[in-house]
Image (cartoon, grey):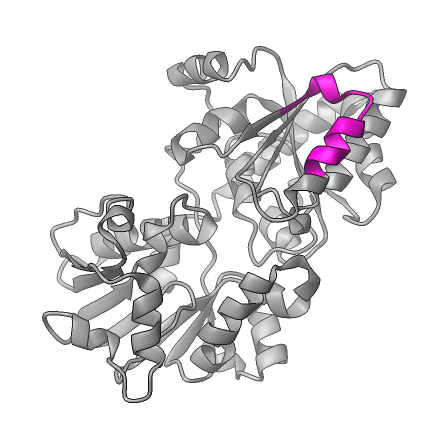
Amino acid sequence: MKIAIDIRCLTDRRLTGVGWYTYHLINAMAAQAPFDQFILFASGTNETLDRRPKLTAPNITIVEQPIPNKLLTLALRFPRGITLESLLPEKPDIWLFPHPHVVRTNLPYVVTVHDLAIELLPDFFTLTDHAREFVVQSKHLALHAKRVLAVSKHTAQDISEKWNIADEHIRVTHLGVDPDLFAAREQPSDRNFRAAYDLNRPYILALATIEPRKNFETIIEAYDAFRSQSKTSIPLVLAGGQGWKSKRFHDVIAASLFRHDIRVLGYIPEKHKPALYRGATVFLFPSFYEGFGLPVAEALSCGTPVVTSFAGSLPEVAGDAALYVDPFNVTDVTQALQHLFDAEDGATLRKELRERGIERAKMFSWTTTAQQT
């Protein structure tokens, strides 16, 4: 079978969850189906095309079109415009779209929907995000797909209820974690990473794009309240690329009584994330909504105790291997930190969460994701 896959998301300046999902899924599919041919389509300027991570399996062919994506979008949206397959050297049997994008095709296709956050929580997104969704029309794309892949049962339920797509038309394909990269055992390179980032003592970690939906404001306020009542002087490390409304994030840090113990690292490359997780005593992820929550699965795999929220798919990912909090309640997050650090059974609880987390993370592999796809 000839399977065409849209990899335009791999040309982003900095890959996030969707990009890494696409990369790992393609590698796993190519390994499991050596007699199938995978035709990967990318477009953009020469600069953006050079950014994408390498995919070198022998049954992979990469087709790069040096067309700026905005121009391609116009060509695809124009009445009687071009089809994506017309840009390929040979006609595939089916398309796989790992993320809703502007599409025109006369072939059957499968599309992955990661979440319905922009529809369920519109205030957490920019005007640019809403404009992109208006152009992409994710719902229309899903309604006409041969099959819709949902990255969690929760997302599948949202798709069924909000878009009125039959359950039998949706397949759940959980995301995966690379067990070799996100291993619990400390690696020799971890010490070099900590030295480079000046992380020479244990810390509380939060890692996500700096944007309102990830709830950094609550994290910082809960940390302030925890430190005000605790003898523990553990620092807070905040990592992630800058999103929108990040000024409020910096203002809250500046107002913190413990701002000198708050470190902001910025974007962390994928290869350094495991060392960052492994160096943390606790990982905080009280997001307001997630379609899957890949950082939680990664932290669990690294053996880091997790505090997360009841929102979206997060309980589906973490199971009984995390402490849960109300993301709207600062006191709830504060009390979780107090339980983990100041309670008599805090050390025991952290050990239990570590063991449960390592076991829980084994449920999520890219091999399984590819098989389900």
Task: Give the residue at the far bottom of this rendering.
Answer: 80
Camera-side residue of 287 and 242 = 242
- Which residue appears at 82% of the width and 27% of the height? 224
Residue 201 at what x, y percent from top left?
A: 61, 12
Q: Is residue 250 magenta?
A: yes
- The residue depicted at 44 percent of the width and 74 percent of the height is 148
Residue shown at 60%/36% (left/top)? 356
The magenta span reads: 249-263
Left/right placement of residue 222 relative to residue 80 reads right
On screen, residue 132 versus residue 40, left or right, reads: right
Q: How many marks?
A: 0
Q: Position of residue 284 (x, y in %)?
A: 67, 36
Determine if residue 7 is in view. Answer: yes
Examine the rendering and report whether any part of residue 336 can be seen.
no
**89 sits left or right of 104 in the view:** left
The quarter of the picture where residue 14 lies is top left
The quarter of the displayed image where residue 250 is located: top right
Q: Quadrant of the N terminus?
A: bottom left
Residue 290 in the image: above or below residue 349: below
Q: Residue 142 or 71: which is nearer the viewer?
A: 71
Q: Does residue 227 belong to the magenta stretch?
A: no
**Image quarter (top left, top right, bottom left or bottom right) of the C terminus:** bottom left
In front here: 302 or 54? 54
| Residue positioned most to the right | 229
Q: Position of residue 305 (x, y in %)?
A: 64, 32
Q: Position of residue 113 (x, y in %)?
A: 48, 67
Residue 99 in the figure: left or right of residue 122 = left
Residue at 17% across / 46% down in the picture? 56
Pick whichever, 352 or 185, lies toward us: 185
Quadrant of the image occupied by residue 216: top right
Main SS category, magenta section: helix
User: In the figure, 333 relative to 111: above or below?
Assistant: above
